[in-house]
Amino acid sequence: MKNLLLIFFLLLAMHLQAKTTLISYTLVEQLSKEDMEAFYKSQGIPKLISPILTGVDIYELFYHTNLPDGERVIASGLYYVPTSYPYEVATMQYNHGTAMKNRTGLDYNGEGTICKIFAADGYAVAWQDYIGLGKATGFHPYQHLETEGQSGVDLLYAVQQINQEIGLQVNEQLFVTGYSQGGHAALAVHKTIQEKYPDDFWVTASSPMSGAHDMSGVQNEIMEVEYSQPHYLPYLLYGYQQIYKVFEDNEDFKRVFKPEYRYVVDNILAKGHNVDEINAMLPEKPFDMIEPYFFNEYKNNPEFYFTKVLKENNTYKWVPESPVQFCYCKGDEEVYYKNSIVAMEWMKENGAKRIINREVSEVFNHRQCADYAVMYTKFFFDSFRNGFKKGRKGNLIKNILVKTVVNIEEKKLKKKD
């Protein structure tokens, strides 16, 4: 009996520990409703698409999360809080795109704008920096499903604590989204919540945007051709080396690369260069930087360890119980659009009941796709706030307006070609 009581209290302590992830938080910016009006005007954001109903307070926070081996690490994030929203506040967990340097301000890739837009319309937005980025030290496990998911969940625990301390009342709605790497991370967070934390969180809906969901399949095919983002390969390999220890040490790992590219790994480790600077150091065809023996093993040996870990980080081989909307563009030159197609088809074939196909454009590239994918994501999430339990593609008039603008922009691009 004593042993049973001891086990019970140990399990209880572990559960409570998982909920106390917050280390500290600081209010770093306060934007009044008038400030948001000026911001929208400066950015050319139409209020018809997303209204301004409140000011926004921005908090920077630090919290604990875990690596797969159990090591406890410190991660950072941002929290965008509506200050005077007249209705119940929903929570949105946001995941940003690829970054290689620590964050000095309150943004990566201009995606802070997305969080402000949602917060000004009554969403409490929890932005994760990911392990090793933001204001955190250590390496970043790029495109790694388990750590993206775990750090996203631990961020949600942390903002629950902040809500209690600042008196923010939130409802039970939780939305998850992100763009590019954030699209991959959005599905990772949704999957992690559903499979590991269903008693503490429930995802109302997710909207992964332009994510590389099929890491071992269609996304990997573009590594053999000219590619606008060759940094993707060494960044991915380096992160997986730190997690999986594919090679005995980092020096052995560097021998995967041809001698003239081995210094790039050191630059990634130092986190002193941005994506464009790393790209300038690399060949246009990513696999041209790899030694032939490694490439041959990858191509011809199905038991090759790296091939296996890539498959582990595909984000789609599970059946979501909540609605998921996939946003993508067929002209995306960075994240092949078939990532979304493969993921949707697998989920539907295996029993997922609410998978929504949101093809944003036939011709937009990765950057052009982002703005419109965000609009469609907001329309989708707003439909749940408006009472549609399974979600809809959103307000018909707003959808028509956005589609009209997309058509105009597509025609301009086709004329240029």
Image: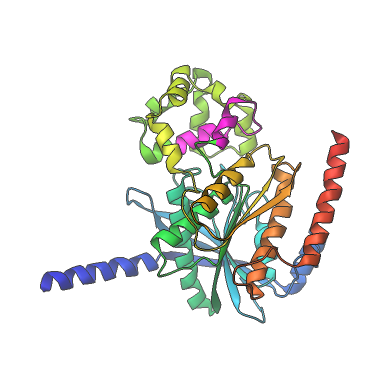
| Residue 14 located left or right of residue 4 | right
Give the x, y percent position of residue 139: 45, 43
Q: Main secondary structure of the magenta part?
A: helix
Q: Is residue 404 left or right of residue 395?
A: right
**What percent of the width, then of the height, locates residue 173?**
55, 72
Q: Number of labelled discs?
A: 0
Is residue 102 among the parts visible in the rendering?
A: no
Q: Quadrant of the N terminus?
A: bottom left
The front one of 334 and 396 is 396
Give the extent of the magenta segment: 218-239
Question: Where does residue 352 sit, x and y in percent of width and height?
Answer: 52, 57
Residue at 84% in and 33% down:
417
Using the rendered view, name the quadrant where residue 364 is placed.
top right
Residue found at x 62% / y 54%:
105
Q: Is residue 333 magenta?
A: no
Q: Residue furthest bottom?
A: 86
Query: Quick check: 197 above or below 161?
Result: above
Reply above or below: 327 against 298. below
Residue at image coords 46%, 20%: 296
Residue 12 vertical placement versus 264 (above, below): below
Q: Residue at x 39, y 60 (%)?
A: 196
Q: Position of residue 329 (x, y in %)?
A: 70, 45
